[in-house]
Image (spheres, rainbow, N blue to C red):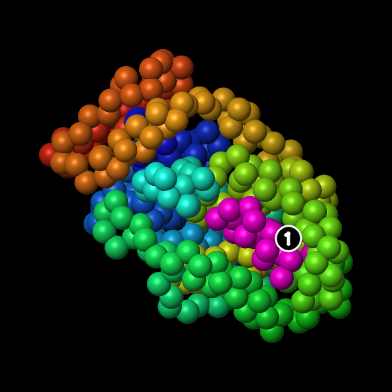
């Protein structure tokens, strides 16, 4: 994450390009999911609401549940839309997060930062969620947590085991509501898993596929390649982007897995702490083209490659800014970055803090 960005700019810049004036007028619910909030009271959604120019009667709030927050927000939004209390209204779900400094530690290679926005309505273009087809499993565990500003700690092994246990528990809960599919392979055209890192998503699929289909390890790996491998198309380039990772994986499947309208996709979400959910959705006509409009690959191609020294300087700068009362981003931290990626690009940028007040502007 660059010196001119924070979780607010990540959230706004993820949502703004896809919203039309009609969308902004229709959005009556905004939920921002994050575990990287810069304030312990004021919600990130307040800044996002303001900078996106949403209407004043748009209910907005922030939710936190590690990497499950965006999925929980989505389920709340679906229920709200289905209630029919505001016909024609839309909901905007945004997840934005950034990794904390772990320079030289084992988890450093998989960490990342990013924002993702979901526009939820009664006229979907990507997927239509199977209402009520949800399996949830929650239990308290101290796997990964952030006990103080700028601090992330926990037990990585415990987190991996909790994630993998959750796959089976949530699928069993899903089956108890939906009924066990006669043929797991035929029932789900593709499977998506939360992606802290690609290998864990693959292990989750192998566990479920071997149990449900009685496959050997080699056959399960082939099943992964056929049903889920495309889910890593963008995640492997972005690193761990927390709650957004599940939906980035879904985008990869919709654009590159070869699914067709009417196909069902199984989705697994996990958040440390913990809560996990298995649910499903059917693919809408034109979904692949709709995902392509987001230009995910092009946006990744347009990123600036950093030297190792520049990358470490950016990480330390982000850490220094987290709780600073007065802070101004260093424009020369990455030479030429402002001119090449911000100036004139119309992105929301972080100008710094003055007596703890956060300041933003359009580049």
Q: Quadrant of residue 151?
A: bottom left
Q: Position of residue 155 (x, y in %)?
A: 43, 67
Q: Residue at x 74, y 48 (%)?
A: 230
Q: Quarter of the image containing the C terminus?
A: top left
**Direction from residue 93 to residue 151 in the image, left or right:** left
For the point 42% across and 45% down, the residue is 104
Residue closer to the observer: 85 or 157: 157
Q: In the image, residue 115 lies at what x, y percent?
A: 48, 43
Which range of residues does the magenta coloring cover? 187-207
Which quadrant would residue 298 be assigned to in this image? top right
| Most foreground residue, 228 or 261 | 228
User: Percent position (x, y) of residue 43?
Assistant: 31, 53
Residue at the disc numbered 1: 191
Q: Residues within 10 Å of mark 1 (few under 14, many from 20)?
A: many
Residue drawn at x 68%, y 43% is 233
Asked which secondary structure carries label 1, the reply is strand
Which residue is found at the position 78% from the left and 69% from the top?
209
Q: Is residue 307 above or below residue 40?
A: above
Asked if residue 189 lies in the magenta stretch, the reply is yes
Q: Residue farthest to the bottom?
A: 176
């Amino acid at each position: 994450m660059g010196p001119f960005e924070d979780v607010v700019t990540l959230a706004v810049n993820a949502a703004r390009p896809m919203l039309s004036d009609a969308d902004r007028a229709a959005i009556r619910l905004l939920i921002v999911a994050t575990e990287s909030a810069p304030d312990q009271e004021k919600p990130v959604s307040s800044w996002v609401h303001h900078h996106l120019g949403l209407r004043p009667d748009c209910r907005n709030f922030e939710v936190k549940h590690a990497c499950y927050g965006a999925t929980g927000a989505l389920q709340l939004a679906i229920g709200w839309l289905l209630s029919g209390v505001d016909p024609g209204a839309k909901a905007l779900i945004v997840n934005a997060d950034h990794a904390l400094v772990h320079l030289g530690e084992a988890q450093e290679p998989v960490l990342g930062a990013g924002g993702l926005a979901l526009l939820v309505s009664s006229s979907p273009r990507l997927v239509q969620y199977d209402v009520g087809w949800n399996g949830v499993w929650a239990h308290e565990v101290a796997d990964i947590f952030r006990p103080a500003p700028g601090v992330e700690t926990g037990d990585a092994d415990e987190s991996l085991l909790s994630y993998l246990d959750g796959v089976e528990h949530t699928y069993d809960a899903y089956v108890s509501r939906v009924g066990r599919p006669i043929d797991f392979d035929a029932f789900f055209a593709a499977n998506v898993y939360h992606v802290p890192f690609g290998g864990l998503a693959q292990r989750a699929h192998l566990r479920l596929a071997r149990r449900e289909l009685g496959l050997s390890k080699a056959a399960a790996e082939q099943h992964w390649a056929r049903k889920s491998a495309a889910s890593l198309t963008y995640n492997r380039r972005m690193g761990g982007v927390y709650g957004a990772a599940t939906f980035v994986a879904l985008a990869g499947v919709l654009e590159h897995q070869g699914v067709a309208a009417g196909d069902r996709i199984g989705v697994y979400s996990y958040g440390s702490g913990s809560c996990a959910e298995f649910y499903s959705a059917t693919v809408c006509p034109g979904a692949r083209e709709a995902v392509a409009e987001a230009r995910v690959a092009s946006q990744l191609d347009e990123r600036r490659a950093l030297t190792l020294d520049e990358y470490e300087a950016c990480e330390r700068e982000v850490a220094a800014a987290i709780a600073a009362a007065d802070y101004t981003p260093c424009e020369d931290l990455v030479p030429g970055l402002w001119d090449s990626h911000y100036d004139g690009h119309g992105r929301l940028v972080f100008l710094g803090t003055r007596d703890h007040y956060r300041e933003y502007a359009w580049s």
